[in-house]
Amino acid sequence: MSGHSKWNNIKRKKEATDGAKAKIFTKIGREIAVCVKEGGGDPNNNSKLRDLIAKAKSNNVPNDNIDRIIKKAMGDSDKTSYESNIYEGYGPCGVAVIVETLTDNKNRTAGDVRHYFDKFGGNLGTSGCVSFMFTTKGIIVVDAAGVDEDALMDDIFDLGASDFTMEGDTAEIETEPNDLHNVREGLEAKGYKILSAEVDRIPSTYTTLTDEDAIKKMNLLLDALEDNDDVQNVYHNWDMPEEPEED
């Protein structure tokens, strides 16, 4: 995530996928399929599935696509089995990177991830080499346009959130991972518009890049990872420069 605003990084991801909606549909579809096979296809009895459906809708996945993915995963004909793996390593100049994958071919995915790190000035490390630098938190981003900050603060702490910040027209709310679902649903029930709600890995320290070549390679590494269908999430401690505001 970015050093100044995690929402900036979320926006970067959204902008990067606007021209390739099929990829984001594929990634979320895999998560939903795994979730259905593990916990059933009824969102009323599968809270994780409810969260994923909300995530899919926030990424503009059509309802028909969501229903089709759930029905396929519930059917006996779907024999595809996805395996979850986590890779840790370093980008240019020692930037810590964690890559979460969901794949039906572990060897292919491991080879791809290693290739990206090698090609763009980094190196793949061993399990645990950078994860100790990150804390897992639930992060909810709310549209705060016209929202009273004091009222929002009362609402989120009543629901069990642990912290929040407001920047312009967005509010970023932090929860414990297991509280994310209840806080999100509580905010929706109170009429707040949820822009995103996901479990995230927050770095304890950040790395600043000043060398132009290192910055270019770090961006290329992130682009390559996020463009791979097997990669679900990428976390890093690069203190990304904020994009200049348009006039």
Image (cartoon, rainbow, N blue to C red):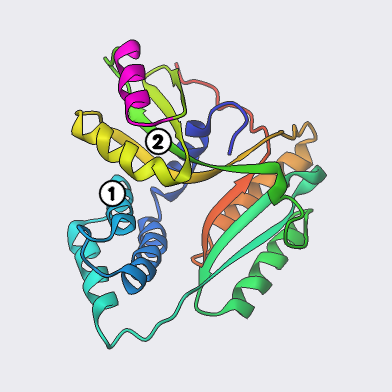
The type of residue carrying mark 1 is Ala
Residue 55, horizontal then vertical, whole percent = 33, 49
Is 178 left, or right, of 136 in this rendering?
left
Q: Is residue 205 above or below residue 61?
A: above
- Residue at x 18% of width, y 63% of height: 64
Distance (Cα) linking label 1 and label 2: 12 Å
Instruction: Tell me the quarter of the picture where residue 197 sits.
Output: top left
Circle 1/circle 2 CB separation < 8 Å = no
- Residue at x 43% of width, y 46% of height: 178
Is 174 left, or right, of 242 in this rendering?
left
Q: Residues within 10 Å of mark 1 (few under 14, many from 20)?
A: some
Q: Secondary structure at mark 1?
A: helix
Instruction: Tell me the quarter of the picture where residue 152 sits.
Output: top left
Residue that numbered label 2 is attached to? 140
Q: Secondary structure at mark 2?
A: strand
The residues colored magenta run: 149-161
